[in-house]
Image: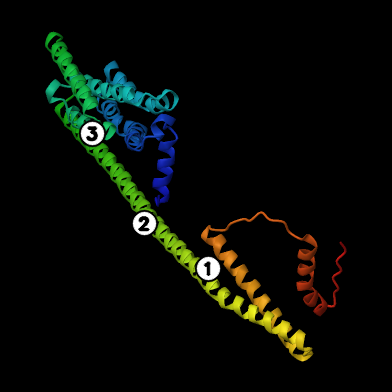
Amino acid sequence: MMLSSPLKRLNDLVDWFLPADVQGDREQRQQARMFLFSHLFGPFIGNSVPLALFVVDPTPGWDVAVLAALITAFWTLPFVLRSFGHYNVLVLVSVQNLVFCILWSCFFLGGVSSPTLPWVLIIPLLTFFYLGPNLRMGFVVLGLFLLNLTVFAVVYAVCAPRLDSLPPAALQGLGIVSTIGTCLYVVMMALYYAKILAAGSELEGEVRRHLATAKRLRQSTAAAERANLAKSEFLAKMSHELRTPLNAIIGYDEMLLEDAHAAGDLATVADLDKIRGAGHHLLKLINEVLDLSKIEAGRMEVLNEPVDVRSLLVAAVSGMRDAAHCQHNEIELHI
Protein backbone atom coordinates (compact mmCIF):
# COMPACT_ATOMS: atom_id res chain seq x y z
CA MET A 1 0.00 0.00 0.00
CA MET A 2 1.49 3.33 -1.07
CA LEU A 3 0.96 5.56 1.98
CA SER A 4 2.60 8.84 2.88
CA SER A 5 5.00 8.59 5.77
CA PRO A 6 2.86 10.42 8.41
CA LEU A 7 -0.23 8.39 7.54
CA LYS A 8 1.79 5.19 7.59
CA ARG A 9 3.14 5.99 11.06
CA LEU A 10 -0.37 6.84 12.18
CA ASN A 11 -1.71 3.54 10.83
CA ASP A 12 1.14 1.67 12.51
CA LEU A 13 0.19 3.29 15.83
CA VAL A 14 -3.49 2.44 15.35
CA ASP A 15 -2.77 -1.11 14.17
CA TRP A 16 -0.72 -1.79 17.31
CA PHE A 17 -4.00 -1.87 19.26
CA LEU A 18 -5.79 -4.26 16.87
CA PRO A 19 -6.36 -7.76 18.30
CA ALA A 20 -5.75 -10.82 16.13
CA ASP A 21 -9.43 -11.64 15.59
CA VAL A 22 -10.06 -8.15 14.18
CA GLN A 23 -6.97 -8.09 11.95
CA GLY A 24 -8.19 -11.16 10.07
CA ASP A 25 -11.41 -9.42 8.92
CA ARG A 26 -10.69 -6.61 6.42
CA GLU A 27 -14.02 -4.79 6.87
CA GLN A 28 -13.97 -4.92 10.67
CA ARG A 29 -10.29 -3.95 10.64
CA GLN A 30 -11.17 -0.70 8.88
CA GLN A 31 -14.01 -0.05 11.35
CA ALA A 32 -11.73 -0.79 14.31
CA ARG A 33 -9.18 1.66 12.92
CA MET A 34 -11.82 4.39 12.99
CA PHE A 35 -12.75 3.37 16.54
CA LEU A 36 -9.13 3.48 17.70
CA PHE A 37 -8.34 6.74 15.92
CA SER A 38 -11.40 8.35 17.51
CA HIS A 39 -10.45 7.18 21.00
CA LEU A 40 -6.77 8.06 20.68
CA PHE A 41 -7.28 11.66 19.48
CA GLY A 42 -10.94 12.45 20.21
CA PRO A 43 -10.47 13.03 23.96
CA PHE A 44 -8.08 15.91 23.18
CA ILE A 45 -10.97 17.73 21.48
CA GLY A 46 -13.63 16.49 23.89
CA ASN A 47 -11.76 17.77 26.93
CA SER A 48 -11.94 21.28 25.50
CA VAL A 49 -15.45 21.52 27.01
CA PRO A 50 -14.53 20.79 30.68
CA LEU A 51 -11.36 22.84 30.18
CA ALA A 52 -13.46 25.81 29.02
CA LEU A 53 -15.76 25.30 32.01
CA PHE A 54 -12.79 25.45 34.37
CA VAL A 55 -11.74 28.70 32.66
CA VAL A 56 -15.09 30.53 32.52
CA ASP A 57 -16.48 29.25 35.85
CA PRO A 58 -14.71 30.78 38.83
CA THR A 59 -16.05 28.04 41.11
CA PRO A 60 -16.31 24.84 39.02
CA GLY A 61 -18.22 22.03 40.73
CA TRP A 62 -17.70 18.33 40.95
CA ASP A 63 -19.91 17.84 37.88
CA VAL A 64 -17.16 19.37 35.69
CA ALA A 65 -14.58 17.02 37.21
CA VAL A 66 -16.84 14.03 36.53
CA LEU A 67 -17.31 15.17 32.91
CA ALA A 68 -13.54 15.49 32.44
CA ALA A 69 -12.97 12.05 33.97
CA LEU A 70 -15.59 10.43 31.71
CA ILE A 71 -14.07 12.00 28.58
CA THR A 72 -10.57 10.99 29.66
CA ALA A 73 -11.83 7.43 30.20
CA PHE A 74 -12.14 7.06 26.41
CA TRP A 75 -8.34 6.64 26.31
CA THR A 76 -8.61 3.33 28.16
CA LEU A 77 -10.75 1.61 25.50
CA PRO A 78 -7.92 1.06 22.93
CA PHE A 79 -5.90 -0.77 25.58
CA VAL A 80 -8.95 -2.84 26.58
CA LEU A 81 -9.50 -3.75 22.91
CA ARG A 82 -5.88 -4.84 22.50
CA SER A 83 -5.96 -6.92 25.71
CA PHE A 84 -9.40 -8.54 25.58
CA GLY A 85 -10.95 -7.97 22.12
CA HIS A 86 -14.79 -8.00 22.03
CA TYR A 87 -14.96 -5.11 19.58
CA ASN A 88 -18.77 -4.80 19.36
CA VAL A 89 -19.12 -4.76 23.15
CA LEU A 90 -16.57 -1.94 23.41
CA VAL A 91 -18.44 0.01 20.74
CA LEU A 92 -21.57 -0.13 22.88
CA VAL A 93 -19.56 0.89 25.97
CA SER A 94 -18.06 3.82 24.05
CA VAL A 95 -21.41 5.03 22.71
CA GLN A 96 -22.98 4.70 26.16
CA ASN A 97 -20.17 6.73 27.71
CA LEU A 98 -20.49 9.40 25.01
CA VAL A 99 -24.27 9.67 25.44
CA PHE A 100 -23.87 9.87 29.20
CA CYS A 101 -21.23 12.64 28.87
CA ILE A 102 -23.53 14.66 26.63
CA LEU A 103 -26.63 14.22 28.82
CA TRP A 104 -24.60 14.83 31.97
CA SER A 105 -23.35 18.18 30.69
CA CYS A 106 -26.83 19.07 29.42
CA PHE A 107 -28.35 18.32 32.83
CA PHE A 108 -26.09 20.81 34.57
CA LEU A 109 -25.94 23.38 31.76
CA GLY A 110 -29.52 24.15 30.84
CA GLY A 111 -31.08 20.94 29.43
CA VAL A 112 -32.14 21.27 25.78
CA SER A 113 -30.62 24.74 25.65
CA SER A 114 -27.21 23.45 26.78
CA PRO A 115 -24.23 24.63 24.69
CA THR A 116 -22.93 21.03 24.68
CA LEU A 117 -26.01 19.64 22.94
CA PRO A 118 -24.41 19.72 19.41
CA TRP A 119 -22.27 16.74 20.42
CA VAL A 120 -25.42 14.60 20.00
CA LEU A 121 -24.95 14.94 16.23
CA ILE A 122 -21.78 12.88 16.23
CA ILE A 123 -23.50 9.76 17.67
CA PRO A 124 -24.98 8.53 14.34
CA LEU A 125 -21.75 9.49 12.58
CA LEU A 126 -19.65 7.41 14.97
CA THR A 127 -22.13 4.54 14.75
CA PHE A 128 -21.56 4.46 10.98
CA PHE A 129 -17.77 4.70 11.36
CA TYR A 130 -17.60 2.01 14.05
CA LEU A 131 -20.16 -0.50 12.74
CA GLY A 132 -20.55 0.15 9.01
CA PRO A 133 -23.64 -1.46 7.44
CA ASN A 134 -24.29 -3.70 10.47
CA LEU A 135 -28.03 -3.06 10.85
CA ARG A 136 -28.49 -5.24 13.93
CA MET A 137 -25.83 -3.38 15.91
CA GLY A 138 -27.15 -0.09 14.53
CA PHE A 139 -30.59 -0.80 15.99
CA VAL A 140 -28.95 -1.77 19.28
CA VAL A 141 -27.18 1.60 19.40
CA LEU A 142 -30.42 3.39 18.53
CA GLY A 143 -32.25 1.55 21.30
CA LEU A 144 -29.46 2.40 23.75
CA PHE A 145 -29.69 6.07 22.81
CA LEU A 146 -33.49 6.15 23.22
CA LEU A 147 -33.20 4.43 26.57
CA ASN A 148 -30.74 7.07 27.75
CA LEU A 149 -33.02 9.85 26.54
CA THR A 150 -35.96 8.32 28.40
CA VAL A 151 -34.01 8.02 31.64
CA PHE A 152 -32.68 11.57 31.19
CA ALA A 153 -36.18 12.95 30.63
CA VAL A 154 -37.51 11.22 33.75
CA VAL A 155 -34.62 12.37 35.92
CA TYR A 156 -34.78 15.89 34.46
CA ALA A 157 -38.52 16.07 35.22
CA VAL A 158 -38.27 14.65 38.73
CA CYS A 159 -35.08 16.35 39.90
CA ALA A 160 -34.95 20.08 39.59
CA PRO A 161 -31.75 20.84 37.61
CA ARG A 162 -29.27 23.27 39.01
CA LEU A 163 -29.59 26.82 37.75
CA ASP A 164 -26.15 27.48 36.39
CA SER A 165 -24.43 30.53 37.75
CA LEU A 166 -22.55 31.21 34.53
CA PRO A 167 -23.29 34.57 32.96
CA PRO A 168 -24.80 34.62 29.45
CA ALA A 169 -21.52 35.75 27.88
CA ALA A 170 -19.71 32.75 29.42
CA LEU A 171 -22.43 30.40 28.19
CA GLN A 172 -22.12 31.84 24.69
CA GLY A 173 -18.36 31.40 24.78
CA LEU A 174 -18.81 27.83 25.99
CA GLY A 175 -21.27 27.26 23.16
CA ILE A 176 -18.73 28.51 20.63
CA VAL A 177 -16.04 26.22 22.09
CA SER A 178 -18.44 23.26 22.08
CA THR A 179 -19.56 23.90 18.48
CA ILE A 180 -16.00 24.36 17.24
CA GLY A 181 -14.95 21.18 19.06
CA THR A 182 -17.81 19.25 17.46
CA CYS A 183 -16.86 20.52 14.00
CA LEU A 184 -13.19 19.72 14.53
CA TYR A 185 -14.04 16.22 15.70
CA VAL A 186 -16.27 15.57 12.67
CA VAL A 187 -13.67 16.97 10.27
CA MET A 188 -10.91 14.91 11.90
CA MET A 189 -12.90 11.68 11.60
CA ALA A 190 -14.01 12.47 8.03
CA LEU A 191 -10.43 13.18 6.90
CA TYR A 192 -9.12 9.98 8.41
CA TYR A 193 -11.99 8.02 6.89
CA ALA A 194 -11.22 9.58 3.50
CA LYS A 195 -7.55 8.63 3.89
CA ILE A 196 -8.51 5.03 4.69
CA LEU A 197 -10.82 4.86 1.68
CA ALA A 198 -8.15 6.34 -0.59
CA ALA A 199 -5.53 3.89 0.69
CA GLY A 200 -7.99 1.01 0.27
CA SER A 201 -8.81 2.09 -3.29
CA GLU A 202 -5.11 2.32 -4.12
CA LEU A 203 -4.54 -1.14 -2.66
CA GLU A 204 -7.46 -2.57 -4.64
CA GLY A 205 -6.07 -0.97 -7.80
CA GLU A 206 -2.65 -2.49 -7.10
CA VAL A 207 -4.27 -5.90 -6.53
CA ARG A 208 -6.18 -5.59 -9.81
CA ARG A 209 -2.97 -4.73 -11.64
CA HIS A 210 -1.22 -7.73 -10.11
CA LEU A 211 -4.14 -9.96 -11.07
CA ALA A 212 -4.05 -8.64 -14.63
CA THR A 213 -0.29 -9.25 -14.78
CA ALA A 214 -0.73 -12.75 -13.40
CA LYS A 215 -3.43 -13.43 -16.00
CA ARG A 216 -1.16 -12.26 -18.82
CA LEU A 217 1.65 -14.39 -17.39
CA ARG A 218 -0.60 -17.46 -17.33
CA GLN A 219 -1.64 -16.77 -20.91
CA SER A 220 2.00 -16.36 -21.99
CA THR A 221 2.95 -19.56 -20.17
CA ALA A 222 0.13 -21.45 -21.84
CA ALA A 223 1.16 -20.07 -25.24
CA ALA A 224 4.79 -21.07 -24.59
CA GLU A 225 3.70 -24.56 -23.57
CA ARG A 226 1.60 -24.88 -26.73
CA ALA A 227 4.54 -23.68 -28.85
CA ASN A 228 6.89 -26.10 -27.11
CA LEU A 229 4.45 -28.96 -27.63
CA ALA A 230 4.10 -28.05 -31.31
CA LYS A 231 7.88 -27.95 -31.62
CA SER A 232 8.21 -31.37 -30.00
CA GLU A 233 5.54 -32.85 -32.26
CA PHE A 234 7.25 -31.29 -35.30
CA LEU A 235 10.63 -32.72 -34.31
CA ALA A 236 9.10 -36.13 -33.70
CA LYS A 237 7.45 -36.16 -37.11
CA MET A 238 10.49 -34.70 -38.87
CA SER A 239 12.83 -37.22 -37.24
CA HIS A 240 10.56 -40.07 -38.27
CA GLU A 241 10.40 -38.78 -41.84
CA LEU A 242 14.19 -38.43 -42.00
CA ARG A 243 14.90 -41.81 -40.47
CA THR A 244 12.88 -43.71 -43.07
CA PRO A 245 14.91 -42.67 -46.16
CA LEU A 246 18.15 -42.79 -44.16
CA ASN A 247 17.52 -46.44 -43.31
CA ALA A 248 17.08 -47.09 -47.00
CA ILE A 249 20.41 -45.38 -47.77
CA ILE A 250 22.21 -47.43 -45.13
CA GLY A 251 20.56 -50.59 -46.37
CA TYR A 252 21.67 -49.99 -49.98
CA ASP A 253 25.16 -49.13 -48.70
CA GLU A 254 25.31 -52.52 -46.95
CA MET A 255 24.35 -54.24 -50.18
CA LEU A 256 26.95 -52.34 -52.20
CA LEU A 257 29.54 -53.04 -49.51
CA GLU A 258 28.92 -56.78 -49.77
CA ASP A 259 29.31 -56.61 -53.56
CA ALA A 260 32.55 -54.62 -53.23
CA HIS A 261 33.95 -57.12 -50.77
CA ALA A 262 33.04 -59.96 -53.15
CA ALA A 263 34.72 -58.14 -56.06
CA GLY A 264 37.82 -57.28 -54.00
CA ASP A 265 37.44 -53.57 -54.81
CA LEU A 266 39.19 -52.14 -51.73
CA ALA A 267 38.90 -48.49 -52.80
CA THR A 268 35.14 -48.82 -53.13
CA VAL A 269 34.98 -50.69 -49.81
CA ALA A 270 36.77 -47.77 -48.09
CA ASP A 271 34.36 -45.24 -49.62
CA LEU A 272 31.32 -47.33 -48.71
CA ASP A 273 32.61 -47.71 -45.13
CA LYS A 274 32.76 -43.93 -44.85
CA ILE A 275 29.22 -43.65 -46.19
CA ARG A 276 28.02 -46.30 -43.75
CA GLY A 277 29.77 -44.59 -40.78
CA ALA A 278 28.32 -41.21 -41.69
CA GLY A 279 24.88 -42.73 -42.18
CA HIS A 280 24.94 -44.47 -38.79
CA HIS A 281 26.19 -41.27 -37.14
CA LEU A 282 23.37 -39.27 -38.71
CA LEU A 283 20.86 -41.95 -37.73
CA LYS A 284 22.14 -41.80 -34.16
CA LEU A 285 21.65 -38.02 -34.07
CA ILE A 286 18.14 -38.35 -35.47
CA ASN A 287 17.27 -41.00 -32.88
CA GLU A 288 18.54 -38.76 -30.10
CA VAL A 289 16.47 -35.84 -31.39
CA LEU A 290 13.47 -38.14 -31.57
CA ASP A 291 14.05 -39.32 -27.99
CA LEU A 292 14.34 -35.74 -26.75
CA SER A 293 11.14 -34.73 -28.52
CA LYS A 294 9.37 -37.73 -26.98
CA ILE A 295 10.59 -36.74 -23.52
CA GLU A 296 9.35 -33.16 -23.96
CA ALA A 297 6.03 -34.40 -25.32
CA GLY A 298 5.68 -36.82 -22.39
CA ARG A 299 5.59 -39.86 -24.67
CA MET A 300 8.97 -41.40 -23.86
CA GLU A 301 8.82 -45.15 -23.41
CA VAL A 302 11.38 -47.18 -21.48
CA LEU A 303 12.23 -50.56 -22.99
CA ASN A 304 13.65 -53.23 -20.69
CA GLU A 305 15.99 -55.38 -22.78
CA PRO A 306 19.44 -56.98 -22.45
CA VAL A 307 22.41 -54.69 -23.16
CA ASP A 308 25.94 -55.68 -24.13
CA VAL A 309 27.79 -53.49 -21.63
CA ARG A 310 31.20 -54.11 -23.25
CA SER A 311 29.99 -52.94 -26.68
CA LEU A 312 28.22 -49.97 -25.10
CA LEU A 313 31.38 -48.83 -23.29
CA VAL A 314 33.60 -49.38 -26.31
CA ALA A 315 31.27 -47.35 -28.49
CA ALA A 316 31.12 -44.55 -25.91
CA VAL A 317 34.91 -44.38 -25.56
CA SER A 318 35.43 -44.55 -29.31
CA GLY A 319 33.17 -41.58 -29.80
CA MET A 320 35.24 -39.47 -27.38
CA ARG A 321 38.73 -40.70 -28.29
CA ASP A 322 39.27 -38.30 -31.22
CA ALA A 323 38.19 -35.27 -29.16
CA ALA A 324 40.49 -36.32 -26.32
CA HIS A 325 43.39 -36.80 -28.73
CA CYS A 326 42.93 -33.23 -30.04
CA GLN A 327 43.48 -32.01 -26.47
CA HIS A 328 46.61 -34.21 -26.17
CA ASN A 329 44.82 -36.69 -23.92
CA GLU A 330 44.40 -40.42 -24.19
CA ILE A 331 41.46 -42.52 -23.07
CA GLU A 332 42.03 -46.11 -22.03
CA LEU A 333 39.30 -48.63 -21.39
CA HIS A 334 39.88 -51.72 -19.23
CA ILE A 335 37.05 -54.22 -18.85
Residue type pointed to by label 3: Pro
Q: Point out residue 124 in the picture as x, y percentages from the top left corner.
A: 20, 31
Q: Residue at x 68, y 81 (%)?
A: 255
In which image quadrant can residue 134 be found? top left
State if disc 2 and disc 3 touch (CB < 8 Å): no
On the question of residue 84 being in view, the answer is yes
Instruction: Specify whether 145 is left or right of 235.
Output: left
According to the image, label 1 marks what residue? 236
CA distance separating discs 1 and 2: 36 Å
Q: Earlier in the sequence, mark 1 or mark 2?
A: 2
CA distance separating discs 3 and 2: 30 Å
Q: Nearer the viewer, residue 20 or 56?
A: 20
Q: Secondary structure at mark 2?
A: helix
Instruction: Specify whether 104 is left or right of 292.
Output: left
Q: Earlier in the sequence, mark 3 or mark 1?
A: 3
Q: Point out residue 68 in the picture as x, y percentages from the top left corner.
A: 32, 23
Q: Which mark lies nearer to you, 3 or 2?
A: 2
Residue type pointed to by label 1: Ala
According to the image, label 3 marks what residue? 133
Q: Nearer the viewer, residue 55 or 281?
A: 281
Which class describes the residues within 10 Å of circle 2: few (<14), some (14-19), or many (20+)? few
The answer to whether 226 is drawn above or below residue 115 in the figure is below
According to the image, label 2 marks what residue? 212
Q: Earlier in the sequence, mark 3 or mark 2?
A: 3
Q: Point out residue 247 in the picture as x, y percentages from the top left corner.
A: 61, 75
Q: Nearer the viewer, residue 271 or 300?
A: 271
In which image quadrant can residue 92 be found? top left
On the question of residue 270 being in view, the answer is no
Q: Secondary structure at mark 3?
A: loop
Q: Point out residue 147 in the picture as x, y percentages from the top left corner.
A: 18, 16
Q: Quadrant of the C terminus?
A: bottom right
